[in-house]
Image (cartoon, rainbow, N blue to C red):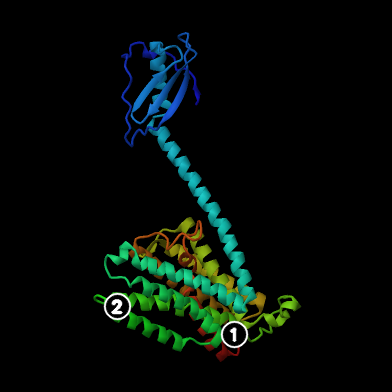
Amino acid sequence: MATVPNLGIDRFKRAPFSLPSLCSCRCNPITSQSLILSCPYSKLSSIGLDFDRNRAVLRSSQNGFWDRRCVITAVAQAESDWLGEENANKEFLLLESQQNANQFRKRVIFGLGIGIGAGTVVLAGGWVFTLAFAAAVFASAQEYFELVRSHGIADGMTPPPRYVSRVCSVICALLPVVTMYRGYIDVTVTSAAFFMATALLLQRGNPRFSQLSSSIFGLLYCGYLPCFWVKLRCGLAAPSLNTRAIWPVSLGGQAHWTVGLVATLISISSIIAADTFAFLGGKACGRTPLTSVSPKKTWEGTIIGFCGCLVTSVVLSKIFRWPSSLLSAIAFGALNFFGSVFGDLTESMIKRDAGVKDSGSLIPGHGGILDRVDSYVFTGALAYNFVKTFLPLYGV
């Protein structure tokens, strides 16, 4: 209930004694509301105006008798203040701004939580890192197969059966564990691909090539490629002797700072810097679209993100004193950047074909797991092979 000041009656003296037509269309929305207006022209202290969809019902406290001028004033005031298109637009804009603020608050809070949790897991390493990574891989694989099954993609091709999708998700989650335990997964991936191909060929009905291709790509995209992060973090266990960072002796002392840990921290930090600077640069001066796959990405934001990625890689290499060569640090940063952009665009292409904005809704304000890790899918393999193959040639 609200008390609205009187508008005066001089301009309503010649008005017809009838209620104005109250429109319930989108241009003038009406909801079920009640309004109390003051009435100084009669003995009534107030008059009530109830809105119910497209009807306005007047009520008073003295057996239904009311002053004509009060009616006109009440209806005019109600139509002006409550039913005006301008006020409706203002209310909509206010609600939209509040939703954007809440969305940004959620994004920041959960982003900080994810960052702290991921940093703790990376520093812990070993089986803590592997098991947490396997859980993230399992969630990502499930989101991928849900995208394949969505209307946007399923209308153009036949998705794999649900039991194949579930088995493939489990296999993807087991691959990081096998990588940690055995150190390699080539035979495991080959065996898994053969098993899925056999299951699809022997299914009831008419097997389709799209079922095989989407399943094998899911095994590669969600299972095999992410395992290189386990090989990078846990497989390169040689101490980074040049690093002077402080680490508790109870947790391994300086020897805990292995080449794998330092390379993982630099790689992840470079990717975060690339995404952050690209977002801020695109917001500030983005004009030229990068590709039709992701219309919001611009060349200006991409270039700024590339510079931020290189700066982060070089600064961290100076802090950790690894790699010792400036050229190697720049090359490592550039490789991380191109891997992150390629992974981001690949996931954007999948979501665009699926006709969805986010891969899921597991993380409030961020979408799904796959939305957060898309930049890391291809980067782990590039970083591992760069450190394992390229750097030893230069004695780093």
Point 51% across, 75% down: residue: 336
- Do we see residue 267 in this rendering? no
Where in the figure is residue 144, as x and y percent of width and height? 41, 69
Point 49% across, 80% down: residue: 175
**Residue pushed farthest left?**
206
Q: Please give the residue where the numbered disc 1 appears in the rendered image.
A: 236
- Do we see residue 84 in this rendering? yes
Left or right of 289 on screen, residue 98: right
- Tag of residue 176: none
Left or right of 266 on screen, residue 147: left
Q: Nearer the viewer, residue 202 or 334?
A: 202
Where in the figure is residue 343, as x and y percent of width and height? 44, 72
Where in the figure is residue 112, as x and y percent of width and height? 59, 60
Q: Nearer the viewer, residue 293 or 42?
A: 42
- Tell me the amino acid under the disc marked 1: Leu
Q: Nearer the viewer, residue 54 or 347?
A: 54
Q: Please give the residue where the numbered disc 2 appears in the rendered image.
A: 203
Q: Earlier in the sequence, mark 2 or mark 1?
A: 2
